[in-house]
Image: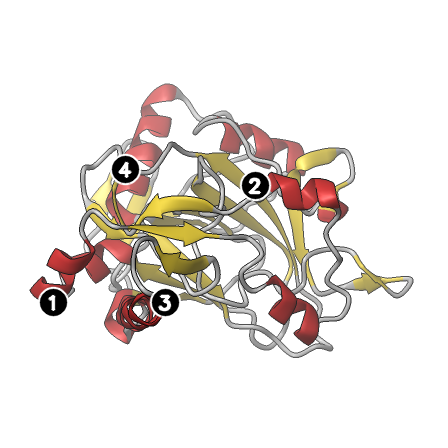
Amino acid sequence: MSALSVTEAVTDFNILPFEAPLGAELIGLDLAREIDAPDFSRIHQAHLNHYLLVFRDQRITPAQQIEFSRRFGALQIHVLHQFQLPGHPEILIISNIKENGEPIGLGDAGHFWHSDLSYVDVPSLGSMLHAQELPAEGGDTLFANMHLAWDTLDAHLKDKIIGLKAEHSYLAQYAELQRRNPWRPNLTAEQIAKVKPVLQPVVRTHPETGRKALFVSEHFTTRIDGLPEDESRDLLNQLFTHSVKPEHVYRHRWQPHDLIFWDNRSLMHLAAGCPEDQRRKLYRTTIEGDVPF
């Protein structure tokens, strides 16, 4: 999956698409330096073309990550304020590290396939994840191409789901995650009020490219609106299984100081996990998108 194919040449850096259902590596770009308008435009177009961009060996500060993220849109603050980076609430700490017996970040993020913040009225456009500490073993992140999942769906299922809406809830798997990870915090009434269930289209249209994509996930999608429970569950299970077929998936094997930027309108992702004794810490920023249609 890490092999590279045809190079797309641009003025100051190269875009090397992966031989995979999605993704490309940007070569020769230092995000610590100012990105001019033409180069930013090329980055934006590459993101639309490949859905996931990998920037290697980025020695940037949290403030620089925030600044670069903001060029794509307003940033969204995660409901788990406990795991914000001190001084930088825009950054969610993804980490299994504990200090003084307490977790410093969200250690089980990505345990189930999902698209970030699909459970709010205005979900995420994309997310950036910057590696701070990586385990010697494990820690990969998997991404599934939801445009490809739609394109390869059986015609009768396409006809069945087009126009339907499904409920997304942040709390859908929360109790299960707490059962597996007792340190995952209880939510306050205020936090729960911020993540009330929402209805989203089962098939969404990308607002910039016009491509259709499946927009359901095992983590957050609870039911298809208007269908009996058994029919809804059966249909969702079919869509979940189809979405993550191996031919739809790219596995990202992290390298030190990687920054990756993916499109939540086009992809789902999953954390593969790592041994408990292996330290892992990454910084995540999340860019606000638009109301799905």
Name the residue carrying label 2: 285
- Give the label on residue 229, or none: 3
- In the figure, is residue 274 to the left or right of 160? right
Name the residue carrying label 1: 154
The numbered mark, 4 or 2, whose residue comes first in the sequence reads 2
CA distance for labels 4 and 2: 24 Å
Q: Quadrant of the N terminus?
A: bottom left
Q: Nearer the viewer, mark 2 or mark 3?
A: 3
**Cβ atoms at labels 4 and 1 below 8 Å apart:** no
Name the residue carrying label 4: 293
- In the figure, is residue 197 to the left or right of 274? left
Q: Amino acid at mark 4?
A: Phe
Residue 144 seen by the camera: yes
Q: Amino acid at mark 2?
A: Thr
As helix, strand or loop, the secondary structure at mark 4 comes to loop
The numbered mark, 3 or 1, whose residue comes first in the sequence reads 1
**Cβ atoms at labels 1 and 2 below 8 Å apart:** no
